[in-house]
Image (spheres, rainbow, N blue to C red):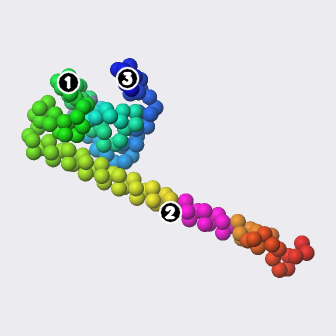
Amino acid sequence: MKSKADYQRYMQSEAWVAFKTRYREAGWPWRCIACGDGRHIHLHHVTYVRLGDEDLRDVVPLCATCHDRLHATCTGAGKGGVPAFRSQLVTVFGLSEKESFVRMNRWRQKGKIGREATKKLKAEKRRQAKEKRKRDIAAMLEARARNGYAADGSRLPGFENN
Ligand SMILES: [Zn+2]
Ligand SMILES: [Zn+2]
């Protein structure tokens, strides 16, 4: 992504919408990390290094007001990753050093729990798919046996002449 126009196009794209959905479904926080508001949430990039192919940990939730404030006050917003964003919570939003660490840890922790929940969900889906396959195969073999065929395709005793 070379220009501001590219970036703005990306912000309107299906890929970005899909990313936001993925972020929410993975259980990452959806409340402004600066003021706690749960409305008009934007995902602010703490780094642009993977722009277009973000990691869920590349963004933090900010309400529209705090997001505007950050970009209006801080020229380095969106660069420097989590450590830089953490210190912006202090310099731009007036949080104490301690509170800024607490918020970032909470965000990270919630993301971690979200990732684990997603993993569990996926494992459960895989397990269900596997059981369904087993049931389907069993049903198929049963149907074959009813028609006089063994699993290997040979005729079962008593069906030889059919
Ligand atoms: Zn806010
Ligand atoms: Zn931003």
Q: Residue furthest right?
A: 161
- Farthest residue, direction bottom: 157
Q: Which residue is mark 1?
A: 75
Q: Nearer the viewer, mark 1 or mark 2?
A: 1
Q: Looking at the image, in which quadrant does ligand 2 appear? A: top left
Mark 3 — residue? 2
Instruction: Name the residue rendered at 18%, 26% in the picture.
Output: 74
The crowd level at tag 2 (other Cα within 10 Å; few <14, some 14-19, many 20+) is few
Q: Which residue is mark 2?
A: 127
Query: Percent from the top left, x then y, of residue 88?
Result: 16, 33
Residue type for callout 3: Lys
Which residue type does callout 2 highlight? Arg
Q: Quadrant of residue 50?
A: top left
Q: Magenta residues, as a range?
A: 127-139
The answer to which of 135 and 88 lies nearer the viewer is 88
**Sequence order check, earlier mark of 3 and 2:** 3
Q: CA distance from mark 3 to mark 2?
A: 43 Å
Percent across and percent down for residue 44 are 28, 33
- Front position among marks 3 and 2: 3
- Where disc 2 sits, the SS reads helix
Residue 28, how many percent across, how many down? 31, 46
Q: Would residue 128 appear left or right of 67 to someone viewing this image?
A: right
Q: Kindly state the secondary structure of the residue where label 1 is placed.
A: loop
Residue that appears at 30% across and 43% down = 57
Q: Secondary structure at mark 3?
A: loop
In the image, taking residue 67 as reference, residue 153 lies left or right, namely right
Circle 3/circle 2 CB separation < 8 Å: no
